[in-house]
Image (cartoon, rainbow, N blue to C red):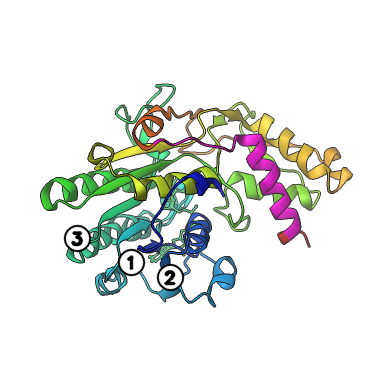
Amino acid sequence: MTNKKLHLDPKYCILVTGGAGFIGSNLCITLLNNGNKVRCLDNFATGKLDNINALLSNPNFTLIEGDIRDIEVCKSACKEVDYVLHQAALGSVPRSIKDPITSNDVNVSGFLNMLVAARDCSVKRFIYAASSSTYGDSENMPKIEDVIGKPLSPYAITKYVNELYANIFSTTYGLETIGLRYFNVFGRHQDPNGAYAAVIPKFVMQLMNHESPIINGDGTYSRDFTYIENVVQMNIRAIAATDKKATNTVYNVAYGERTDLNELVALLKEYLSVFDSKISEVQIKYGPTRQGDVPHSLASIEKAKTLLEYHPEYDIKKGLKEATTWYWQNLKQ
Ligand code: NAD
């Protein structure tokens, strides 16, 4: 586990919203392994019971099936909680373009409910999933936390509004907050199915089934793909931070390198071919670029390194090797 060198006091009770989802379930597992009491609040909109089934028998784990759009649910979930790791949201840019109202209800009104509940229950710190989409049309490279552009989708607006609200709750009510701008996270438990699946699990499943992945555009678009272990590390560091200068702000959570889609598919084929040599022969197809997609994304992680001592241990190759092994062992039919 990446947090070996990190000391997180096991006496804390931590609420993970969206705890049945990809990132949330990985957080729950690490925290339970550390001996913490973990409460998971999820309405299973996109989360899966499979992700947390193994945790249900752990006496330190409590599942609250509920919706963050209900303030009473949020308040009861926050009672006697030390830290909140708020992950619950509707992800995906295309989903928000198709249905901006529901994305706004969950990602903005639900977020505000959680802030109010955390404030009223005097939680020590509210740490939340922000997003690299907040950089919008900014062409700066690498992305530095203070320089953002105009949002390019309803989803990006919701995530930016989260940051604005968190800042106001810090300055107005004294609630400590930390926003984590995740950059294209991947790894075990990420859902490969459905119209809004992320590119890595979707391509992995297609390759495992000998189907051609379709790259949007010519494959030169690039992303700072970030393995889940780095994200877990960052959340633990955000809880453990004792320096006040490190709080009431936002951080990029990334590895700090970018990989284009052509390179990504080549790596996936290489690692999956270890299990099935025929995968190396699967052809790649190319389609039109997608609305709302930025051509390139690369994070500066200097702020997190300096203020939170964040040191990502997984580059894309190490992460993809683990992730492809997990998909092969768990989802290959
Ligand atoms: P996910 O869809 O796997 O997890 C989200 C979880 O929130 C799911 O379990 C879902 O059921 C739950 N949820 C949704 N609406 C809810 C509601 N109304 N009430 C209670 N629970 C609700 O997605 P993820 O990739 O694990 O994302 C977690 C967070 O990280 C989200 O806030 C997302 O916007 C953010 N994020 C993710 C990425 C990424 O690359 N995965 C990048 C940037 C930001």
Instruction: Give the residue displayed 33% in from the left and 66% down from the top.
Output: 68
Q: Is residue 140 left or right of residue 3?
A: left
- Residue carrying label 1: 68
Q: Quadrant of ligand 1?
A: bottom left
Quadrant of the rendering where the C terminus is positioned: bottom right
Is the C-beta of the residue carrying label 2 under 8 Å from the nearest atom of ligand 1?
yes
- The amino acid pointed to by label 1 is Ile
118 is higher (above) or lower (below) than 282: below
- Give the image quarter of residue 267: top right
| Mark 1 sits near ligand 1, with its Cβ under 8 Å away | yes
Element under disc 1 = loop
Specify the quadrant of the image occupied by residue 326: bottom right
Crowding around mark 2 (Cα neighbors within 10 Å: few <14, some 14 to 19, many 20+) is: some
- The residue beneath circle 2 is 43
Number of the front mark, 3 or 1: 3
Callouts 1 and 2 close, C-beta under 8 Å: yes
C-alpha gap between disc 1 and disc 2: 8 Å
What secondary structure is found at the residue carrying circle 2?
A: loop
Horizontal side of 290 relative to 112 (left or right) equals right
- Give the side of residue 249 with respect to residue 299, left or right: left
| 261 vs 14, nearest the viewer | 14
